[in-house]
Structure formats: C-alpha cells, structure tokens
Amino acid sequence: MTALSGLVLADAGEAADLAAFLGRLIHYDRAAAVRLQVGGGAVAVFGRPPSFDVLAVRTSRLAGSGAGAGAAAGDFDVTVSAGELLEGIDESTGAVAVPGAVTGPPWAGVLPPRGGWRQVPGLPGTDAMRAAVAAAVAEFRARDEALAPEDRTRATRDRIGREIWSRTLGETELPLRAVHAAQSLGFLRPARRADADPAAVALLAAGGWLRLRTPYGSIAVRRAGLGVLSVAPV
C-alpha cells in the first residue's frame, strides 16, 4: 500500500488536540505505534497505552489531503510511529506529515467495528467519572502504603491494581480502567463551550466491544477484558 505523504486538518485546534494525544501515548510507551485510518473527511488515530490495556481513538476532521508520488488522495490505512507522526504535526497550519509505515503490533490488527454501535444506559456524568477515578487511585495508594515492606512486591501490587481497575463503573459493564485511561489521555476534560451537547459523552456497545465516547476521543475495550493492568496510579 502506498501511503499519503501529508494531511491537512480542519484547523489548528484539531492539530493541537492530536499532538496532545500522541504526546500522552508516548509518555506511556516511547516506541508507541499508532494506526491511521482516513475516510469520510476525517482521520482516526488508534493507540494502545500499555498502562491501561485499552484502545484509545482520536478522530480529527480533515480540511483536505496531499498525496505523495504515485498515491491517490482519498481513503487509506497505515500503521506508523507515534513519535514520528507527532514530529510531523505543524500546529500553526494543521498540516501533518505522515511518516513511513512500520510493522504493526498485534493489537493493530484487531480494531473495534466501524459501525453497528448502540448507546447503552447507565453512564454517570463526567464529574462522577472523574471522582470514581480519583477514589480508585486513592484506594490503590492507601493499600500500597499499608503493605509491609516485604509484601510490597510487583505481584502483590499487580493483584491490587487488577482488583481495583477491573471493577465496573456504576451499573454499566465498563471497567474503571477505561475511565482512568480516558481521564489520563485528556478525553474527560471539560467541554470548550458551556452549551456543549451532554449527549456527546456516551457509552456505546457493538458486538463484544464497549466504547466510552467523548468530544475529545474514545476508549474501547473488549467486554471479556484485555489482559494484565499496570499498577501505575498515574
């Protein structure tokens, strides 16, 4: 597949948000890769921060796209280095230089479905979600500090982390680790406009996937879980 050499985002704000998202991914994994899917006037960037075992998605509106030699403007799908993509963003103009493709990690081949999502009830408001994360982080720290020095092992701390972050949010099936990831990646920050649509934050389901959608990005998880959780209470 021949990738496009560049994209132009709709405005500088979109470029700044994408850069912030990539920077947060790199904070958790300096060698992070992301999968880009372009279509329908937008680019979706998928990443997997290892500290949370979730898929994070940032979708940015496009103003247009530029094609490299032999490439046709339009839809494309490529996995690239998150760091190189970040370096290629010009926040002042919204231009994005897309780096060369890399061999994708295993998660990049198993993405949530594009369609078929339905909203499910029971999601608390964003303030309540942030409070739930803060309470869980405080509990982790308190339980960690209460351990005897000889018991403060990686295995014990992992067990405490799994117990806390595998709990579900309220009456939903959404694990707390997904909400923690959304907050840590900047997806649960207050809306820019006072009259922002509260329905923009929602819990969706499709097949075996759940997706926490916000105006700034989405967190997707499999209902069966995605493996071992890091203990870092970031």
Image (tube, grey):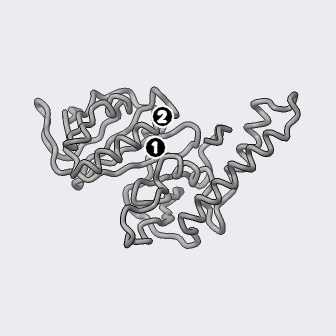
Q: Is residue 213 above or below residue 111?
A: below
Does 74 sit left or right of 201 as displayed? left
Q: Measured from the top left, where is residue 231 in percent x and y?
A: 68, 38
Q: Measured from the top left, where is residue 173 in percent x and y?
A: 62, 62
Q: Is residue 102 above or below residue 156?
A: above
Does 230 sit left or right of 56 as displayed? right
Q: Which label belongs to residue 106?
A: 2
Q: Which label belongs to residue 214?
A: none
**Mark 1 → mark 2, Cα distance in angstroms:** 8 Å
Identified by mark 1, the residue type is: Val
Q: Where, quadrant-wise, is the N terminus in this rendering? A: top left
Does 11 sit left or right of 101 as displayed? left
Q: Measured from the top left, where is residue 197 in percent x and y?
A: 39, 71
Q: In the rendered picture of this protein, how many numbered marks are placed on residues?
A: 2
Are discs 1 and 2 less than 8 Å apart at CB? yes
Q: Residue at x 34, y 51 (%)?
A: 59
Mark 1 = which residue? 110
